Image: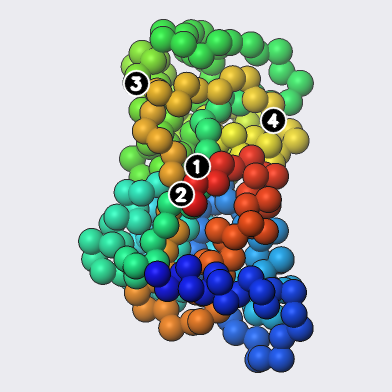
Amino acid sequence: MRIRRALALFLPLAFAASGAAAADVTVFAAASLKEALDEAVRRFDADAGHRTRVSYGASSALARQIERGAPADLFLSADVEWMDYLAARKLIDARSRIELLSNRLVLISPAGSDIEVAIRPDFPLGELLGTHRLAMADPDHVPAGRYAQSALETLGAWTGVSGRIARTENVRAALALVARRETPLGIVYRTDALAERKVRIVAEFPVSSHPRIVYPAALSASSRSPAAVQLLAFLHSKIARAIWEKHGFTVLH
């Protein structure tokens, strides 16, 4: 496999001074990856001598941009559906595709709040909200929102709150609403909550309540960047694993 070969070549050279000209890599990545991926990219660029640019957003929005011809070398999605969307249109290099990471879904509140609840079937989410809204990514388009809706439907809580959702363009926007105390509760990934000191995790959703959270990664079909191949290899190396796990992700590959 091309990525495995690149990994074998890259790692022994990772800490060597690079005499080659720096190459640019453009990455489109799910917003929930920001802190961890920023750290991984800094390490990769410092070791390999490349320059990497990362554009963060909702996986759906990024996939649509790639479909319209945006110049991305590498795509990291927060679910398999949007990677499948690009694959069906032959816009990714199918040989390079890997399942990279997993995550957990959590209910959050502002730091310092006294909200406590156990997440189980028919838990009183509507009562906890009172007259306020629940912050979550738009379930019609964004993976985090779809996972959240699925979990609430499974637990019998969706009907009672579906008319009181503060829908956001990506999961980080939902996180921000809770951090700014504009909503008393939100649903985000565990890694998002760990990255924001102004929120606290109230409870984790059972993994059985929603589809498995998977972050696939793949090169774009249009990429001609050897550095992008190296970066994808690096992202599932032992060095990167330590970074992902430090930020709360589960490494799958």
Q: Position of residue 77 (x, y in %)?
A: 44, 54
Task: Give the residue type at disc 1.
Answer: Ser
The reply to whether residue 58 is in sight is no
Q: Residue beneath label 3, please?
A: 153
User: Is there CB contact under 8 Å for labels 2 and 1?
Assistant: yes
Q: Name the residue at 75% across, 35% down.
A: 197
Q: Which tag, 3 or 2, sits closer to the chain's start? A: 3
Task: Give the residue type at disc 4.
Answer: Val
The reply to whether residue 208 is in sight is yes
Label number found at residue 152: none
Between the residue at mark 2 and the residue at mark 4, the CA separation in whole angstroms equals: 24 Å
Between the residue at mark 4 and the residue at mark 3, the CA separation in whole angstroms equals: 24 Å
Q: Residue beneath label 1, please?
A: 102
In the displayed structure, does residue 182 sit left or right of residue 120? right
Q: Name the residue at 71% across, 66% down.
A: 43
- Vertical comparison of 127 with 74: above or below: above
The kind of secondary structure element at disc 4 is strand
Between the residue at mark 4 and the residue at mark 1, the CA separation in whole angstroms equals: 21 Å
Q: Residue beneath label 2, please?
A: 215
Q: Quadrant of residue 182?
A: top right
Q: Which tag, 2 or 1, sits closer to the chain's start? A: 1
Q: Name the residue at 40% across, 69% down.
A: 1
Q: Position of residue 145 (x, y in %)?
A: 42, 36
Q: Which tag, 1 or 3, sits closer to the chain's start? A: 1
Q: Nearer the viewer, mark 4 or mark 1?
A: 1
